[in-house]
Amino acid sequence: MTAMTDLSASAKPSRFSLLANPTRFLDLSGKVQPWLYGVALVAVAAGVFLGLTAPADYQQGATVEIMFIHVPFAWLAMMIWTVMSLSALGTLVWRHPLADVSIKAAAPIGAVFTALCLITGSIWGRPMWGTWWVWDARLTSVFVLFLMYLGLIALTRALEEPGKAARPAAILVLVGFVNIPIIKFSVDWWNTLHQPASVMRMGGPAMPAAYLTPLLVSAVGFTLLFFALHLTAMRTEILRRRVAALSRLAARRAEA
Amino acid sequence: MQAEYSAFIAAAYGISAVAILALFVWIFFDARAQRKALKGLEARGVRRRSDVAAPRNAESAR
């Protein structure tokens, strides 16, 4: 509240430009952060509990319980790349100072959730399909997404000066975004062992409430968990850049 | 029938829990390391230009 007073004297800046100020971002995100973690934890716990106590599927038996983590991880794998694509536009179009920070902070989190999507899917595939892995359209396109996350992590950490990798990273993210619709529609376009969409499809979800409710709660929980982790990682990245800038300043002063 | 699947289910949930916990721990310790480094620099009197103008701003006044 008190911090607002010094701003009200001048023309009121838009919310967008307010968030462009890293110091203000640190203030706001610091307040939001604990709530985000709290709600995420409650939702994940509720979703997993409802999922593990859901009745066994008539075809898949108890392995259907893997769905309540596998599907949210798959959703996150694609959503995080989409969040990074929006951030990439922020870098290339508006030169938003936090956009590059957002991409760099999101990449490792996206890589972990994509890896978990592949691992849980593989563990589910073994008893249901009789194989850990097939090189079909859905599995391969998600594996390519995982490799792109790794490439992006390498690129954002390759250059000493943090801002330098911003443009190439943003371009890589936007080019990689073509893979997202390919993943989504791979089950419709090609023959694959993977089942087609059963939640986000024309004609509404094809799933009984006993499965749909825990799945949605779990998906919301993991999504909030991503945003909480992303916020923390972004705050850290801002601090890291300040530390780097101040260290250079200190070195220059020592020379003078 | 349930018993032969329980190892698969436990593995899927277990690996996920360990991986997400490791991710959280890494992000947490990274955050702490950068906060410490910044405090250390400020304690040595290295400040950002915007903080030099208003030194009251710095939380790390020793």
Image (tube, rainbow, N blue to C red):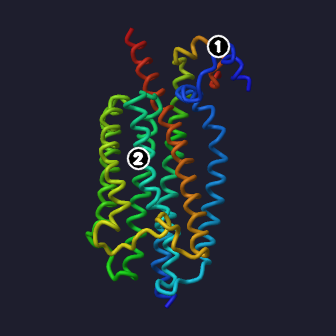
- Label 1, residues with CA under 10 Å away: few <14, some 14-19, many ≥20: few
- Label 2, residues with CA under 10 Å away: few <14, some 14-19, many ≥20: many
- Name the mark nearer the viewer: 1 or 2: 1
- Which labelled disc corresponds to residue A107? 2
Q: Secondary structure at mark 2?
A: helix
Residue matched to label 1: A10
Q: Chain of mark 1?
A: A
Looking at the rendering, in which quadrant would you find the C terminus of chain A?
A: top left
Q: Which mark is first along the chain, 2 or 1?
A: 1
Looking at the rendering, in which quadrant would you find the N terminus of chain A?
A: top right
- Left or right position of A150 against A42: left
Q: Residue at x 34, y 43 (%)?
A: A173
Q: Residue at x 36, y 54 (%)?
A: A180
Seen in the picture, residue A5 relative to A146 is either above or below; the reply is above
In this rendered view, identify the residue nearer to me: A182 or A74: A182
Badge 1 amino acid: Ser
Q: Secondary structure at mark 1?
A: loop
Seen in the picture, residue A223 relative to A7 is either above or below; the reply is below
Q: Residue at x 33, y 45 (%)?
A: A152
Badge 2 amino acid: Ala
Q: Position of residue A205 (x, y in %)?
A: 52, 69
Label 1 in the same subunit as label 2? yes
